Image: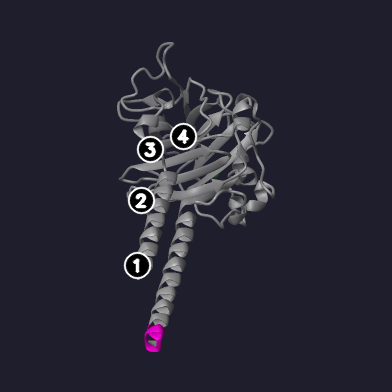
Amino acid sequence: MVNFGVLVSTSVLFVVFGLCLVSCDITDGNAEHLKREHSLMKPYQGVGSGHSSQWDFWGSTLVTNSYVRLTPDERSKQGSIWNTVPCHLKDWEMHVQFKIHGSGKKNLHGDGIALWYTKDRLHPGPVFGNQDQFLGLAIFLDTFRNDLHGMDRSFPFISAMVNNGTLSYDHGKDGRSSELGGCSVEIRNKDHETYLAIRYSKGRLTVMVDVDDKNEWKECIDIGGVRLPTGYFFGASAATGDLSDNHDIVSMKLYQLMVEHTPEEESQDWTKIEPSVSLLKSPKDNIDDPTGNFRGTPLTGWKVFLLLLCALLGIVVCAVVGAVVFQKRQERNKRFY
Ligand SMILES: [Ca+2]
């Protein structure tokens, strides 16, 4: 029975190790790794003023002491805020605290917020207040359904798009033809704080939301094969049309993820990478088959945990069976004497 004890304690160790791996895999959030030059935080001192400013803003954007309002709850407004410092981190995670609120009742509000990691900054245009045919990554928090044929999903809808400068965002179809993945989330008029996290690491793009006041991240998008260069800019923009909302950014905090790369990866010029996604199918086909997005991505935290749990159960069963067989044999041996 000593063997059984050793086996159990070994497996418990494995599980504890596994749990650590899982928790380490989830949101970094480590204050040491916060990059202030890419973060926008209260009370937004120095935003938009002087040469040393790390954030510029445009349009209807209003900076107060407790939030940055990209648009007020008024028709036909556009605003944006942009980091002036290009980001040279290979692996990062951006945490955005936002607040979308207004007097518009159900479905009578719009249009939403877009979060950007792009080559160009401060280029107003038709995509949530920013230019179309952009180079880089966009995450859309689309609060208004434009496409009346797309009733299979509810709004607000969060989606991701990677563009090499050739694609257009189809506003009339809520960007469906170019989206890489997405999820429906209730994000308007919440009394509690609402957050979104974008993680880009080793070609994997993950978007998570924390909007239920439970202080936990829920996965919204997780796709592999995403290639983004370094040296792009972070930004946020919002627009209203015939319908409106207050689109507020409370904070944008960028964390560096400590990830090792192969010498081959390190020797590459990351600023020369063209934004792309190597999906097995075209992004459009992935709409009805969200699992298609997960192909070729590493195991997620809970999968690792499940595997370890199965392994532990297997070991325990083997140990019990082994112990019983051992005991039976001992008894049989006793009988022989
Ligand atoms: Ca829309």
Specify which label sits upstream in the sequence, 1 or 3.
1
Q: Residues within 10 Å of mark 4 (few under 14, many from 20)?
A: few
Residue type, mark 4 in image:
Met
Where are the magenta residues, as a range?
Answer: 331-336
* Residue 71 in view in this figure: no
Instruction: Calculate the distance from the C-alpha at mark 4 to the C-alpha at mark 2.
Output: 29 Å
User: Mark 4 against mark 1, which lies toward the viewer?
Assistant: 1
Report the magenta stretch's main SS. helix
Q: CA distance from mark 4 to mark 1?
A: 41 Å
Work out whether mark 4 precedes mark 2 in sequence or the reverse, and give the earlier one.
Answer: 2
Q: Which residue is mark 2?
A: 212
Under circle 1, the secondary element is helix
Residue 64: percent from the left, percent from the top?
33, 26
Q: Amino acid at mark 1?
A: Val
Locate the N terminus by quadrant. Answer: bottom left
Which of the two marks, 1 or 3, is nearer to us in this view?
Answer: 1
